[in-house]
Amino acid sequence: MLYKYVLKPILFMQDPEKVHDRFVKVGSVLGKFKMMRFLVKVVYGYENSMLNTEVAGIKFKNPIGLSAGFDKNCQLTEIIPSAGFGFEEMGSVTGEKCEGNEKPRLFRLKKDKAILVNYGLVNKGAEYLSKELEGKKFLFPVGVSVAKTNDRKLDTEGGIKDYAKAFKLMHPTGDYTTINVSCPNLSDGQTFGYPDNLDKLLKEISKQKIIKPVFLKLKPDMDLEKVDKVLEVVERYKFVTGFIFSNLTVDRKGLITDTSKMKEGSVSGKPVKEKSTKLIRYVYKKTKGKYVIMGCGGIFSAEDAYEKIKAGASLIQLVTGMIYEGPGLIKKINKGLVKLLKRDGFSSIDEAVGADLK
Ligand SMILES: Cc1cc2nc3c(=O)[nH]c(=O)nc-3n(C[C@H](O)[C@H](O)[C@H](O)COP(=O)(O)O)c2cc1C
């Protein structure tokens, strides 16, 4: 209520990137104090054993995670668990420090419940962040997303080296590593989600010592033939634990907001919802649940999260829903999930995973 009727109208009058930066600053300060963490938890926390789950050997208090792109430099891992999340994915972190694309690079598409994003992977880089986070113990499961530096000079080989550097430096941090092969906002246009380059990339990564689950984050704009080819490649690399469906969409068809003046950028939120769920359902069915799937895209309610879980997602990630609905959304989703599980006669989240297809 406070967010929706008081804070959001004020925040939504301001530049979205400035609001994001301020949010991160405030959140990182709050997280330093036990008392503040406790108070935030009193307001936003929610626990229920029906939501406990173990995925890829990692124990989660609930299946709702903060997706990559909000906590780019890992400054929020103290406060995010108090806000009710079961995990977070920090990053994306690239081989080299990255200033990102030209500003403005973030636009709210309010009528579409979406954000047009053209950050271009702003982050402090793997060398700095790996030192900063060395040996850090987190309060909840944390994944690290790695990506290729947004540098037009990098060719395919250079891109692979850059990914490999980010992976090597960041893999020791947190509980799992995601290889983001789907950032649509790189100045050279990304190609590593495509089968040939993906194969080369995974071959290079497979030479490293892999000690934790590894996920691939894919784009929503793929036809099923392309998905099959990606699966064929991934099949060769046993270290891949699963997928995140999905990243932002480049598809602007059907948007209510006129985005013709916003030349660059890709879309988050509601417009990604159906696209990502379709891919989750397809891959879960095709691979018979062999891969762990994290569902991401357009989650604004418990029903949205449940739909992805029943389609085959073991875990959920979101960011745009929280920006539109406020941090109270996480508790609302978790509470709502418990109700939905009970309604359908499930005693845990695990029982509901892929239920549509059983
Ligand atoms: C502001 C913003 C920045 C993002 N940056 C990243 C990023 O650095 N790495 C990444 O893998 N995804 C990034 N994403 C994509 C989200 O993690 C997510 O996949 C996508 O927005 C769909 O989920 P949503 O509808 O809940 O936002 C970003 C999204 C937003 C809105």
Image: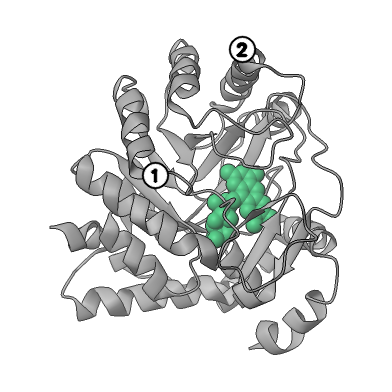
Please name the amino acid that badge 1 sits on.
Answer: Asp
Image position of 256 with respect to 188: above or below: below
Give percent across and percent down for residue 177. Answer: 50, 33
Residue at the left extreme?
A: 358
Graded by Cα atoms within 10 Å as few (under 14), some (14 to 19) or many (20 or more), the crowding at tag 2 reads few
Q: Quadrant of the C terminus?
A: bottom left
- Whole-number angstrom distance, CA of label 1 to CA of label 2: 26 Å
User: Where does label 1 land, which residue?
Assistant: 223
For mark 2, give the secondary structure.
helix
Tell me where residue 308 sits by quadrant: bottom left
Let me know if residue 161 appears in the view: yes
* In the image, the residue with mark 2 has its CB under 8 Å from the nearest atom of ligand 1: no
Point out the tag, 1 or 2, that comes first from the N-terminus.
2
The residue shown at (79%, 33%) is 98
Give percent across and percent down for residue 302. Answer: 40, 74
In front of the other: 16 or 7: 16
Image position of 329 with respect to 293: above or below: below
